[in-house]
Amino acid sequence: MAIRFLLNGEAQVVEADPTVTLLDWLREARRLTGTKEGCNEGDCGACTVMVTDQGGARALNACILFLPQLDGKAVRTVEGIAGADGTLHPVQQAMIDHHGSQCGFCTPGFVVSMATAHLNGRTDHDDQLAGNLCRCTGYAPIIRAAEAAADAPVPAWMHEDLAALSDAPAAETPFIPRTSDNLAEWYAANPEATLIAGATDVGLWVTKGLRDLSPVAFLNQCEDLKGIVANQETICVGAMTTLAEFGAFIADRHPSLAEMIRRYGSVQVRNAATIGGNIANGSPIGDSPPALIALGATLHLRERGGPGAACRWRSSLSITASRTGRRGSSSRPSVFRSSPTRYGSTNCRNGSIRTFLPSAVRSTSWSTGAPSPPCASPLAAWGGRRNAPPVWRRP
């Protein structure tokens, strides 16, 4: 499949296996070796890159980022942080001035994380750099460098990626559906497929487990599975909403839940991981299901009953009932089947919370015959505090 994206401002058209990681491609195909391989599982941050789309710039781990997830986006590696004329970015100069590098192996990842935070106006440096590990400095000089660069103006070249992106979506491929209906049609023909959301867990199936996941579909461009909508009684959260987006939204409604999400992985992980995928993969270390179970959350599943049957939303299934053990989930026999959970939504009736969430990483079934869930679109619902106005928000 052809994947189109910008790399340090230059257009790329890449033909590659869908489970080739950005890190491997950068180092082996492009010889851009500034992006380092440390843990190869999204823990150390040495491979951090900046990815920009119409939603803004995010720091992500290249080691568990598959190339198709970049379709239509812009990537900036450490080689692209300085200006074209060699002018250093303020965070690079600050790292020099404050002796923020010793052995240097972690430095590229720190620089990209710092540059992304600087572009986004973030000054919570401890949080923004929590996903980058250093064995030499003790972190103090790195934090001093981040603080020193915080008030410097953002270099003009750091705004070029967003300006260069086209508003028109890239051509749809079987691997990258743009809507849940497109996904349903493709999944009907590929019932044993692996559906990939943020790949923060599935990525390790490739980098550590060396598994062949084919056929695969990447859900990160299914726009109707994203977003958060709230009214006075319900908050609807799309299953492809990232944990970073969900945490920012929920902070003033349920601060303790937002604090739990802040401790989930790192900025790089939260920028990629989705609420739907966190439920769907049935991971024994998934952080959101315990909170959702405590809130009495239920899932609404989309399944298909038989060949030719229309897809529909099944009314509800508790998260507890959906989990059958380590990485296990329950689902009715259906035409489409893979493994863990599916398209979901969550409902809670304990006075303050009502949840509903759709879709996931590695879906299994879709359903037939029921009306759409309580939200206007296939989003997920979470009962927020009363008098919360309708809202759509990105962090």
Image (tube, helix red, strand yellow):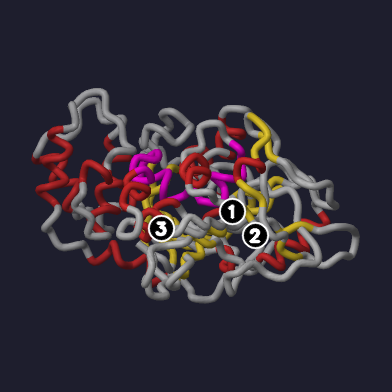
Q: Are marks 2 and 1 in contact (CB under 8 Å)?
A: yes
Query: What residue do we see at 21% from left, 49% from top?
Result: 124
Query: Label 1's element?
Result: helix
Q: Position of residue 353 (x, y in %)?
A: 46, 58
For marks 3 and 1 on the same chain, the one whose residue lies earlier in the sequence = 1
Q: Which residue is mark 1?
A: 68
Q: Nearer the viewer, mark 2 or mark 3?
A: 3
Residue type for callout 3: Glu
Report crowding for label 2: few under 14, some 14 to 19, many 20 or more residues within 10 A (C-alpha): many
Query: Label 3's element?
Result: helix
Where does the magenta region start and end?
A: 260-282
Report crowding for label 1: few under 14, some 14 to 19, many 20 or more residues within 10 A (C-alpha): many
Query: What residue do we see at 11% from left, 40% from top?
Result: 144
Residue type for callout 1: Pro
For marks 2 and 3 on the same chain, the one whose residue lies earlier in the sequence = 2
**Residue closest to the eye, 234 or 6:** 234
Q: Position of residue 168 (x, y in %)?
A: 54, 76
Query: What residue do we see at 33% from left, 38% from top?
Result: 131
The quarter of the picture where residue 61 lies is top left
Residue type for callout 2: Ile
Q: Is residue 63 visible?
A: no
Residue 116, above or below 205:
below
Question: Which disc is residue 245 wearing?
Answer: 3
Question: Which disc is residue 176 wearing?
Answer: 2
- Residue 100 included in the magenta stretch of the image: no
For marks 2 and 1 on the same chain, the one whose residue lies earlier in the sequence = 1
Q: Nearer the viewer, mark 2 or mark 1?
A: 2
